[in-house]
Amino acid sequence: MLWEEAAQGFAAMGSESRLQVLRCLIRAGHDGLLVHEIQERSGIAPSTLAHHLKFLTGAGVVEQERSGRSTVNRANFDQLEQLANFILSECCADSSSEAKSND
């Protein structure tokens, strides 16, 4: 994952409301939710919700699929896993060298 892609993904989750939307979609699993279902669960106004979904979709952490007149929204679990791996990839990398330098 490139730094720019990671930064965009984390920026998309950098709002309390967008995090709330994303968590609703994560809880829904691979079935996803329709916009009105997200609105009911989150209490976010429809126009504001559309803005947040656009931001999350643009960053690739949410996927949308048209189904007739409805749009199913799903968390992009692959992208979320890549973001988690990106931020944790160097976990504790310096801790072993610190321990050696203190000896």
Image: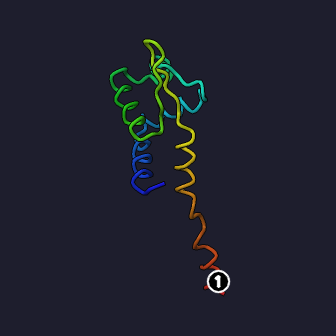
Task: Name the residue: 57% across, 46% down.
Answer: 81
**Figure coloring:** rainbow
**Residue 43 percent coordinates (x, y):** 44, 22
- Which corner quadrant of the image does residue 92 belong to? bottom right
Relative to residue 22, is residue 86 depicted above or below? Answer: below
Task: Name the residue: 54% across, 43% down.
Answer: 80
Tell me the crowding category of disc 1: few under 14, some 14 to 19, or many 20 or more residues within 10 angstroms, Cα based: few
Task: Name the residue: 59% across, 63% down.
Answer: 91
**Residue 76 percent coordinates (x, y):** 53, 37
Secondary structure at numbered mark 1: helix
Q: Nearer the viewer, residue 78 or 36?
A: 78
Q: Which residue is mark 1?
A: 100
**Three-letter amino acid code of the residue under disc 1:** Lys
Task: Name the residue: 50% across, 34% down.
Answer: 22
**Residue 55 percent coordinates (x, y):** 37, 36
Relative to residue 88, is residue 51 depicted above or below? Answer: above
- Which corner quadrant of the image does residue 97 belong to? bottom right
Q: Residue furthest bottom?
A: 103
**Residue 42 percent coordinates (x, y):** 47, 25
Q: Tell me the quarter of the image containing the C terminus.
A: bottom right
Relative to residue 92, is residue 65 depicted above or below? Answer: above
Q: Nearer the viewer, residue 2 or 18?
A: 2
Relative to 59, 84 lies left or right: right
